[in-house]
């Protein structure tokens, strides 16, 4: 949902926007495609990238059954790791990877004032967010701005 609004905004600002198509296989004919569920990715058709904005993940809406929770975690952690690893392998990797985590990182803390230096909370979403942010390690180790 955020990407649907962000892409036109960036394009209006004069930026060239390339969407990475989510596909089950390369059979759809897209030059650049990604299947976060299987970690298959092809960045061959993207050209030079200044930045990558990664917002993909299983929607949080609905009943959080054990299966749904696993899809939430896997889509964020495995998807982010596979994207980070693919980006460092292209000939001219981007300088920046923007990976949106979530305020769930802080857990439920009542009226406590929280900022970027606040410790992670507890619970399912906090654990997912910690693992999600850690999944950017391949890009961070290569010097990407995060």
Image: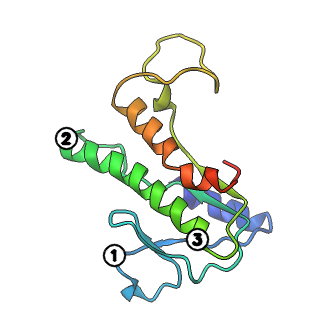
Q: Which mark is residue 89?
A: 3
Q: Residue at x 69, y 64 (%)?
A: 94
Left or right: 92 in relation to 53: right
Instruction: Quote the CA–CA distance across marks 2 and 1.
Output: 24 Å
Mark 3 residue crowding within 10 angstroms, few (<14) / some (14–19) / many (20+): few
Q: Where is residue 81 drawn, in percent x and y? A: 47, 56
Determine the residue located farthest toward the right in the rendered image: 14
- The residue that mark 1 highlights is 24
* Relative height, residue 140 to residue 28 (above, below): above
- Which quadrant would residue 35 be assigned to in this image? bottom left
Q: Give whichever of 2, 112 is nearer the camera.
A: 112
- Mark 3, secondary structure of its residue: helix
* Relative height, residue 142 to residue 60 (above, below): below
Which comes sooner in the sequence, label 2 or label 1? 1
- Which quadrant would residue 38 be assigned to in this image? bottom left
Instruction: Quote the CA–CA distance across marks 3 and 1.
Output: 21 Å
Instruction: Quote the CA–CA distance across marks 3 and 2.
Output: 34 Å
Coloring scheme used: rainbow
User: Which of labels 3 and 1 is toward the front?
Assistant: 3
Mark 2 residue crowding within 10 angstroms, few (<14) / some (14–19) / many (20+): few
- Mark 2, secondary structure of its residue: helix
Q: Residue at x 39, y 63 (%)?
A: 36
């Amino acid at each position: 949902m955020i990407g649907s609004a962000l892409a036109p905004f960036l394009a209006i600002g004069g930026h060239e926007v390339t969407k990475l198509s989510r596909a089950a296989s390369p059979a759809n004919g897209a030059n650049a495609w990604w299947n976060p569920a299987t970690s298959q990715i092809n960045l061959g058709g993207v050209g030079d990238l200044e930045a990558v904005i990664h917002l993909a993940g299983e929607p949080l809406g609905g009943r959080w059954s054990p299966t749904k929770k696993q899809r939430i975690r896997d889509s964020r952690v495995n998807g982010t790791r596979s994207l980070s690893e693919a980006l460092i392998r292209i000939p001219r990797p981007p300088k920046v990877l923007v990976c949106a985590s979530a305020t769930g990182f802080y857990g439920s803390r009542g009226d406590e004032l929280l900022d970027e230096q606040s410790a992670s909370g507890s619970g399912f979403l906090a654990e997912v967010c910690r693992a999600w942010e850690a999944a950017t390690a391949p890009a961070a180790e290569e010097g990407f701005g995060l």
